[in-house]
Image: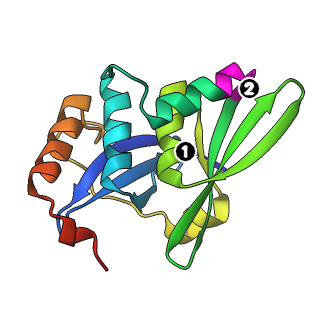
Amino acid sequence: MVEVRLSAVRVDLQSNTPVLLLTEAEGLGRTLPIFIGAPEATAIAFAIQGVATPRPMTHDLLRDIVEALGASLERVVITELRSATYFAELQLKRGTGTLNVSSRPSDAVALAVRTGSPLFVADDLMDAEGILLPSDDEDEDGDSTPDELVGEFRQFLDTVRPEDFSS
């Protein structure tokens, strides 16, 4: 497995769709781009920004349930791409046992951001789908600040239309 970090949540300008960018923590610096839905992008942006909501949002609730059951999220693994759909697993630890739960990558990342859990991508998946992105002139290491990420997403929300999501 390749450890990755959430380097950005951006909006693809061609499709006007949010995209997660998961970049290798070490090594070649390949990035796995995963297109996600607007609600999940909002959930991730809120967690990155530390936005407090009056009531728990779905991913906050899931974090609280995992903790209430005496478990912890040990890691998230993006496992495969099948029929243009990415798959992920939540690897939960409870006592001495481990439980793998299937998840959408966007939900898994939203939960990992809330718990500080590490992110991984299967080796063969990163080999097949990882790309080298050109350097970003925004700052030296190519990361956007949380304010920039939220600003990009707000711009996306201002321009998105329901018909953009129809197939």
> In the image, is 47 to the left or to the right of 88?
left
Amino acid tagged 1:
Ala
The verdict on residue 67 being magenta is: yes
Q: Secondary structure at mark 2?
A: strand
Query: Split into 4 quadrants, where in the image is the C terminus?
Result: bottom left
Name the image quarter holding residue 49: top left
**Residue 123 position (above or below residue 143):** below
Q: How many marks?
A: 2
Give the mark nearest the N terminus, 1 or 2: 2
Q: Position of residue 151 (x, y in %)?
A: 15, 38
Residue 149 in percent (x, y) is at: 23, 39
Q: Which residue is mark 1?
A: 108
**Residue 81 locus on image (x, y percent):** 57, 70
Graded by Cα atoms within 10 Å as few (under 14), some (14 to 19) or many (20 or more), the crowding at tag 2 reads some
- Position of 111 compared to 122: left or right? left
Is 151 on the left or on the right of 66, as rendered?
A: left
Rendered image quadrant of residue 90? top right
- Look at mark 2 in the image and give the residue it sits on: 71
**Residue at (54%, 48%) from the top-left corner?**
27
Q: Residue furthest right?
A: 96
* Membership of 46 in magenta stretch: no
Task: State the residue at coordinates (83%, 37%).
Answer: 98
Q: Residue furthest front?
A: 55
Q: Which residues are magenta?
A: 66-72
Q: Position of residue 146 (x, y in %)?
A: 26, 30
Image vertical order of residue 48 relative to residue 25, above or below: above
**Residue 28, can we see it?**
no
Amino acid type for the residue under numbered disc 2: Ala
Residue 74 lies in quadrant: top right
> How far, Cα to Cα, is label 1 from label 2?
15 Å
Q: Residue at x 38, y 29 (%)?
A: 47
**Residue drawn at (86%, 23%), measured in percent from left and top?**
95
